[in-house]
Image (cartoon, grey):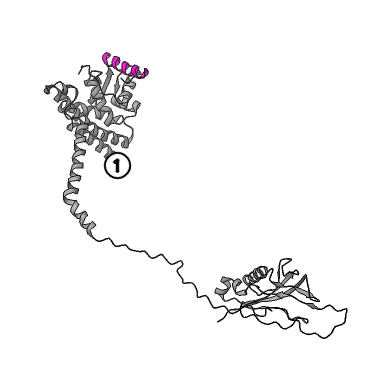
Amino acid sequence: MGKDRDVRMSLQTLKVLEAFLENPTDELSGAEVLQRCRLASGTLYPILLRLESAGWFVSRWESIDPSSAGRPRRRFYRLTPTGLRRASEVFAGFGRGVLA
Amino acid sequence: MTSERAWDWVDGIARRLIHGAARRAPNSLSERLEEEWLADLAAQRGPIGRLRFALGCCWATNIIANEHVAVAALPAAASPMSHSQPLFTGRTITFVLVASLHAAVLYGLAMGLGPQFSKIIESPLTPRFIEPPPRSSLPPPPRPQISASRIDVPPNEAMPAIESDPTDGVEGTPREPQIPALPPSPPAAVNRVQGGPGVGFPSADDFYPDASIRKGEKGVATVSTCVDGKGRLTSEPTIIQSTGSKRLDEGALKLAKAGSGHYRATTEDGRPVDSCYPFRIRFDLRN
C-alpha cells in the first residue's frame, strides 16, 4: 500500500478513475462505483484493489457498529494525492491525443 | 408468499456465493472482501441483481488471487526483468492452456483418430445417381389416338362433290374445284362457286386442344370466314355453331386463322371474288 506504481490502463479502469475524479475528495463505496460506472462486480473489485495496491487509492471502513446498524460495514475508497496527480496525467494525456 | 420464499432462497445463495468466494481469496484479504462484498450486496437492487453481484464476486476472487500470487512473487524474483513482468500472469496461463488443448487435439488426430479416418476413406467411392422425381404423382393419361378430324363444307347447290384428301387428314377438303358440266343457264345468271378450305389448309389434328384430348371432348364447329380472291382472311373468323366446348371452339378459330392464304376463293364465272362462307370443322377421337 502506498507505493506509487504504474497501473495497466483499460477502459474499465478509466471509467473508475473518472468516477473518482468528478469529486476527487469524495469517498465512494464499491456499490456506489458500480452504480456510477455500470461495471460488473467481477471487474470492479480487482481494479479497486489494483489501484489501492499501486498507491492511487486509500480505503477505510465505514465508522459504524455493524451490530447496532444491523448490516456490515462498507468500505470507502478515496483518491490519494498521488492517485489524483497520476489520474489527471492520464486524462490529460488523452486530451493531448497521447495514450498515457 | 411462495415467491418471497424463493427470493429469500436466492438471496441466501448470493450470500453463500460471496462467503465461498471470499474464502478462496488470499488470506490477507479474505475477511475484508467478505465484509465489503456483503455490505455492497445489500445495496444491490432485486434478488437477481444481488445474485449477479455475487457471481461477479466469484469471478473477482479468481482475478484477485492470480494478481496476488503474481505480486507476491515479485520480491522473490531476483532478475530485473521479472520486476516488470510476472512469471505467470493470467494471460500466460490462458495461453498455455489453449496451446496445450490444441496440442492434445492434434496429437489425438495424428495418433488415435487418424487411422479411423483413413479407414473411412479407404472404402471405395461409388457414384450414386439419383433418379429425378416424377413430374407428377399420377402418370399422364395415355394420349388417345386421334381420328382424322374432318372439315366439312356445307353443301352448296352450285358446289360439286368434294373429293377427300387422304394425305392431310382433313376430309372433305377439295383439292381443286371441279366444275361439272352444268346445264346451260340463262345469260344473266352468274356461275358462282362457293369457296372453302383449299390446298395446304392445316389439319384439324394439329389444333386439337390437349386438354380436350385428355377429356375426350369432341364435336363439330361451324365457322364463318370472309376470304378475298387470293384465299386470305379479310376479317376474324367467328363461330356460328359451337361444339359445346369452349376449348374446341378456340381450336377451331385458331385453325381457321392459321388457314389464311390456303382458302379456296369463291368464284363467279370463274373469277375469284371476295366472299364470306361457313364451313365445318370436326374434332373427333379415334377409339
SS assignment for the magenta stretch, majority:
helix
Q: Which of the image's four quarters has the C terminus of chain A? A: top left
In the rendered image, residue B185, in percent from the top left (x then y), is placed at: 85, 83
Asked whether A77 falls inside the magenta stretch, the response is no
Residue displayed at 24% across by 38% down: B13
The one of B268 and B132 positioned closer to us in this rendering: B268
Q: Is residue B4 above or below residue B133?
A: above
Number of marks drawn: 1
Q: Is residue B165 above or below residue B21?
A: below
What residue would you read off at disc 1?
B6
Residue B231 located left or right of residue B81: right
Q: Which of the image's four quarters has the N terminus of chain A? A: top left
In the rendered image, residue A71, in percent from the top left (x then y), is placed at: 25, 27
Q: Quarter-wise, where is residue B51 in the image? A: top left
Tell me the amino acid under the disc marked 1: Ala
Q: Is residue B210 above or below residue A23?
A: below
Q: Is residue A71 something one can see in this rendering?
A: no
The one of B165 and B181 positioned closer to us in this rendering: B181
The one of B86 and B160 positioned closer to us in this rendering: B160
The disc numbered 1 marks a residue on which chain? Answer: B
Other residues around mark 1 within 10 Å, as few (<14) / some (14–19) / many (≥20):
few
Residue A78 located left or right of residue B160: left
Tell me the magenta residue range. Answer: A81-100
Asked whether A97 falls inside the magenta stretch, the response is yes
Residue B188 located left or right of residue A1: right
Q: Is residue B268 something one can see in this rendering?
A: yes
In the rendered image, residue B128, in percent from the top left (x then y), is placed at: 33, 63
The residue tagged with tag 1: helix, strand or loop? helix
Q: Quarter-wise, where is residue B38 in the image? A: top left
Residue displayed at 56% across by 71% down: B210
